[in-house]
C-alpha cells in the first residue's frame, strides 16, 4: 500500500481504534478510517493486510480484475431525453481522452480498480469546456486523498495540492457506505474483508512451507543400535544423494537401519480446505460467480446457459457499480444531459436466437431496421430507408370494450365489403 504524506498526517489528527479500525477525527468531528499499522490492517491470523498484500491473494486479484475488466469493456455515451425518447449526443472529450497521459480504457480501468478494491475512486479535475463540463481528470490513488466532512459538505485534501478542495475540484465515486454521518465516503473493502484475506494468505503460506520446508520428515531410517551423530549425518547424506537432494530430509535413528514412511495426518492437511473455503468467501464478498474465477468445481446456482449466466452477472454483480459510475458522470454534465453505459454486449445471445428476436421485434412494429443495425454495431441504411416501422396487415385496434371475437367479426365484415366492392 502506498502510504503518502497525507496518510501520515492523518495519524496526527488523533482518534480511537476498535478491532484495528483507527478513526482519525477532524476538528469538526468527521473521520477517516486508516490502517492500524504501517504494514496494513491487523488480522486475527497475524498476517497484516493492505492493498498490495490483498492482491497477492489469487481470488482477490481475480475478483478485482474481473470487475474492472468488465466495466472497462462497457461502451459509454452521452444522451438527453426529448419527448421521452433517448437522443444520443456526441461523446465528450472526457469519454475519449480524460487524461493527457492515458486514454479512456486505461483511465476507467484505474477508476474501477480503486472503486472495487478500495471503495472510493478519485480524480482531480484539471480542465473544463465552455459548458463547464470537465474535459481532463487526473486519476488519484485513494491513499493520496483524505475526505472529511465540513459544514455538511465533503472536503478533500490531495497530496501535493491545497487543502479544502470541493466536489467541483475532485471527481469522487464511492462504493458501499454507511448512512448518516459517514455517508460521504465509501467503506474500504480491504479493511472489512481483512480477516478473510489474512486467513487465506496465512493458509497459502503455511501450505507452501509445509510442502517446501516442512519440519516433518518424509520418513525415518531407524535401528535398535546406537550410532554417533557423525555416522547418522553421513548416512543421511548418502541417502539424500542416492534419492536426490530434497528439502525434507529423512531422520536417521540408530545402527541397524530400517525405513519407515511418515504419513501426514488428515487433520494436519486441513489447510487445503481452508484455502478453498476462503476463495469461496471472497467470491461471495464481491458477488462474483465462482466459475468466472476458476472455481468451476464448486456448485453454482447462477443458472444454465451463457445468456442466463451473463444476465445474472450483469444484474447482480455489475449493475450496482454501473449505476454509481453513471450517476457520477451525469453529475458532471449540464442538465438534462446524462451518461449511460451499454451492457448489451454482455447480454448478447447466440446469433440465431438474436436474429429471431430481431425478426419478432421488426414484425411487431416496435423497432426499425436502423435500430437493429445499431444493436449489431452496424451503420444506418443510407437515405433514411431504415427508419420505417412495419405494421402487420392483420393487426387492427381493439374497439373499446371489445375483444378478439369483435376483431374477428370486424375483419370478416371488412372482407365481405371488399368482395362486394369488387363485384360492383
Image: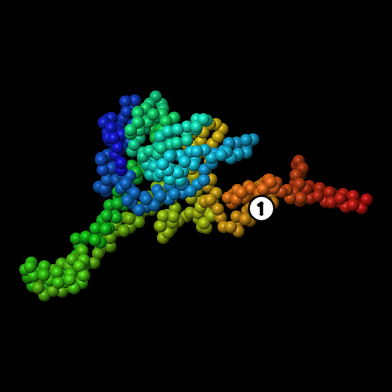
**Residue located at (53% from left, 55% from top):** 307
Residue found at the very far front of the displayed protein: 100
Inspect this view and state whether residue 271 appears: yes
Inspect this view and state whether residue 325 appears: no
Q: Please say if 170 is above or below 313.
A: above
The residue closer to the viewer here, 410 or 295, is: 295
Secondary structure state at the residue bearing disc 1: helix
The quadrant where residue 258 appears: bottom left
**Residue located at (11% from left, 75% from top):** 256
**Residue located at (40% from left, 39% from top):** 139
Q: Position of residue 23 (x, y in %)?
A: 31, 34
- Give the residue pinned by disc 1: 360
Q: Position of residue 246 (x, y in %)?
A: 21, 66
Model colouring: rainbow
253 sits to left or right of 100: left
Q: Please say if 96 is above or below 352.
A: above
The residue closer to the viewer here, 297 or 95, is: 95
346 sits to left or right of 361: left
Q: Residues within 10 Å of mark 1 (few under 14, many from 20)?
A: few
The residue closer to the viewer here, 137 or 2, is: 137
Q: Quadrant of the N terminus?
A: top left
Q: Where is residue 116 in the image (x, y as percent from the top left)?
A: 40, 44
**Residue located at (44% from left, 56% from top):** 291
Count of numbered labels shown in the rendering: 1
The residue closer to the viewer here, 290 or 388, is: 388
Q: Position of residue 165 (x, y in %)?
A: 39, 29
Amino acid at each position: 500500500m502506498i502510504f503518502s504524506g497525507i496518510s501520515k498526517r492523518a495519524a496526527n489528527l488523533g482518534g480511537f481504534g476498535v478491532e484495528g479500525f483507527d478513526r482519525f477525527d477532524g476538528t469538526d468531528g468527521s473521520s477517516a478510517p486508516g490502517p492500524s499499522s504501517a504494514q496494513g490492517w491487523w488480522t486475527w491470523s497475524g498476517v497484516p493486510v493492505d492493498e498490495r498484500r490483498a492482491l497477492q491473494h489469487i481470488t482477490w486479484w481475480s475478483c478485482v480484475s474481473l470487475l474492472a475488466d468488465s466495466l472497462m469493456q462497457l461502451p459509454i455515451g452521452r444522451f438527453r431525453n426529448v419527448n421521452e425518447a433517448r437522443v444520443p449526443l456526441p461523446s465528450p472529450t472526457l469519454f475519449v481522452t480524460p487524461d493527457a497521459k492515458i486514454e479512456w480504457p486505461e483511465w476507467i480501468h484505474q477508476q474501477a480498480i480503486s472503486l472495487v478494491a478500495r471503495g472510493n475512486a478519485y480524480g482531480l479535475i484539471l480542465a473544463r469546456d465552455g459548458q463547464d463540463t470537465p474535459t481532463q481528470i487526473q486519476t488519484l490513488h485513494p491513499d493520496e486523498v483524505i475526505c472529511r466532512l465540513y459544514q455538511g459538505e465533503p472536503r478533500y485534501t490531495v497530496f501535493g495540492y491545497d487543502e479544502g478542495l470541493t466536489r467541483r475540484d475532485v471527481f469522487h465515486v464511492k462504493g458501499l457506505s454507511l448512512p448518516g454521518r459517514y455517508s460521504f465516503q465509501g467503506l474500504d473493502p480491504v479493511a472489512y474483508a481483512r480477516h478473510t484475506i489474512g486467513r487465506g494468505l496465512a493458509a497459502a503460506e503455511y501450505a507452501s512451507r509445509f510442502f517446501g520446508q516442512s519440519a516433518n520428515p518424509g520418513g525415518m531410517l531407524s535401528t535398535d543400535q546406537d550410532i554417533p551423530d557423525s555416522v547418522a549425518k553421513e548416512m543421511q547424506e548418502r541417502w539424500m544423494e542416492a534419492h536426490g537432494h530434497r528439502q525434507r530430509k529423512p531422520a536417521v535413528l540408530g545402527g541397524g537401519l530400517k525405513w519407515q514412511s511418515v504419513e501426514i495426518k488428515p487433520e494436519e492437511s486441513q489447510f487445503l480446505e481452508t484455502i478453498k473455503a476462503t476463495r469461496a468467501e471472497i467470491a461471495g464478498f464481491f458477488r462474483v460467480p465462482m466459475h468466472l474465477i476458476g472455481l468451476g468445481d464448486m456448485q453454482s446456482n447462477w443458472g444454465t446457459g451463457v445468456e442466463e449466466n451473463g444476465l445474472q452477472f450483469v444484474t447482480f454483480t455489475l449493475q450496482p457499480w454501473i449505476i454509481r459510475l453513471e450517476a457520477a458522470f451525469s453529475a458532471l454534465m449540464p442538465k438534462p444531459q446524462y451518461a449511460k453505459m451499454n451492457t448489451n454486449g454482455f447480454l448478447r445471445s447466440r446469433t440465431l436466437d438474436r436474429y429471431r428476436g430481431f425478426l419478432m421485434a421488426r414484425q411487431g412494429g416496435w423497432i426499425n431496421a436502423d435500430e437493429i443495425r445499431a444493436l449489431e454495431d452496424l451503420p444506418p441504411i443510407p437515405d433514411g430507408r431504415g427508419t420505417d416501422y412495419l405494421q402487420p396487415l392483420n393487426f387492427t385496434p381493439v374497439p373499446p370494450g371489445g375483444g378478439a371475437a369483435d376483431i374477428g367479426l370486424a375483419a370478416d365484415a371488412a372482407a365481405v365489403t371488399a368482395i362486394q366492392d369488387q363485384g360492383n
